[in-house]
Image (cartoon, grey):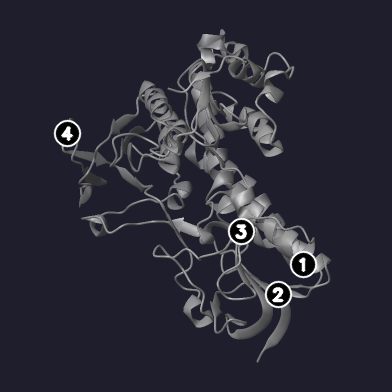
Amino acid sequence: MGRHFDSIIIGAGQAGPSLAGRLTQSGQNIAFIERSLFGGTCVNTGCIPTKTLVASAYAAHMARRAADFGVHIEGAIKIDMKAVKARKESILAKSRDGIENWLRHMENCTVFHEQARFLSSYEVQAGSETITAKQIFINVGGRAHVPKMPGIGQITYLTNTSILNLEELPEHLVVVGGSYIGLEFAQMFRRFGSEVTVVEMGPRLVQHEDEDVSAAIKEILEAEGIHLRLNAECIAFEAADKGAYVHVSCDDGEPKVHGSHVLLAVGRIPNTDDLGLQAAGIVTDERGYIVVDDQLRTNVEGIWAMGDCNGRGGFTHTSYNDFEIVAANLLDNDPRRVSDRIHAHALYTDPPLGQVGMTETQVRQSGKPALIGTRPMTKVGRAVEKGETQGFMKVLVDAESKKILGASILGTGGDEAIHCILDVMYSGRPYTTIQRAMHIHPTVSELIPTVFGDLKPLV
């Protein structure tokens, strides 16, 4: 039968370790299984390493702009990719090691650094050992999707994971995919000095955003010299002497693009294919995501799924919130639900995009009578002072209840300022709560009351 525990947690992403802390504090004896790197996507291949590289790219960008601020730098700006990588590795290693050490020294927590596989609804194989528990929590995350596009097997390609290990600067990086991950890497490597082309099957970038947001991001990227190939409906690959050819079918431009490096950024898939979920009777959808209810319970009693593998978020913050929901329900007699949370995400191009609640497109589709307010970042004193005036703010309000429906801030500090709006949305207060607030000058947030003070009907 093997060793028995009160609970088993599979996967050391954002939700798993924090849940381990709560369960052990409650008196449980738990088993924690992680097959690879502690910390999951965020720490190892997601937020921490990419935003560290974004910071290096921003430094290079500002160095090139130094003369705009009356600062003169002698000589060319040079990028030391080995040093950039070393800085990234140093920062993520502290987080990864911190999580692993916390778990390994956690009282009543036994760590298995092994592959996990279900044998039944209560039995899990951890390496060569079989362990059992009445409660099992799955937090296995996801990975880059590599679709079976023509010629993909003929070339060497990068994913969001392997591109982090480059120690040389690509001469020409071709990014396949014009959404969040692809655009962050595109701008980053352009600022490092690479020629960059983004190939996107759709008619516009970041298609989940409103058209005006997509258009503004397109303008920002093109102003930095990034080539965009939209409507690329027939993407295919061909090996070349140096690098690869990416075939596209676009309205204009050359029929194929030659790149020294190719980055695939065309979506994510869950790490559920090698867990033996069928042995436990756990239901997944057609994409492999574990189906969960509003409190993150699977169809099998005593088994929960948290984080990217359940298809209910796909962000670090949604994964951590999954932990909070599970812990509240199990340990605090606090019936929290996934449906209680308000959608929120950011795109970390420069300037960043912060988006919460409904988009303008979604509001229009809902048929709700609504009000809208917009302001360009050129009206934000803080942005003008920093010399970063690209982008705009947009807010949407229910015309009847006066509650905020959603907002987008594309501009410097937008990823932080958006929380002024999000917190009022969670409080259930009308937009006048922000409109009448006195914000500090000079900040990006200070213009938000002004935007709400000049609403017009959405027609």
Q: How many other residues sit within 10 Å of disc 4, few (<14), some (14-19) or many (≥20)? A: few
Mark in the foreground, 4 or 1:
1
- Quadrant for the C terminus in the image: top left
Q: Which mark is residue 7?
A: 2
What element does badge 4 sit on?
A: loop
Label 3 secondary element: loop
Q: Is residue 373 left or right of residue 367?
A: right
Q: Quadrant of residue 220?
A: top left
> Residue at label 4?
254
Cα separation, mark 1 vs mark 3, equals: 16 Å
Up/down of 206 relative to 73, above or below? below
Residue identified by numbered label 1: 23
Q: Is residue 135 above or below residue 384?
A: below
Q: Earlier in the sequence, mark 1 or mark 3?
A: 3
Rounded to the nearest whole Å, what is the CA distance between mark 2 and mark 1? 8 Å
Residue 270 versus residue 422: which sits nearer the camera?
422
- Report the side of 378 relative to 295 (left or right): left
Q: Residue at x 51, y 27 (%)?
A: 370
Alpha carbons under labels 4 and 3: distance apart: 42 Å
State the residue position of label 3.
13
Above/below status of 367 relative to 387: below
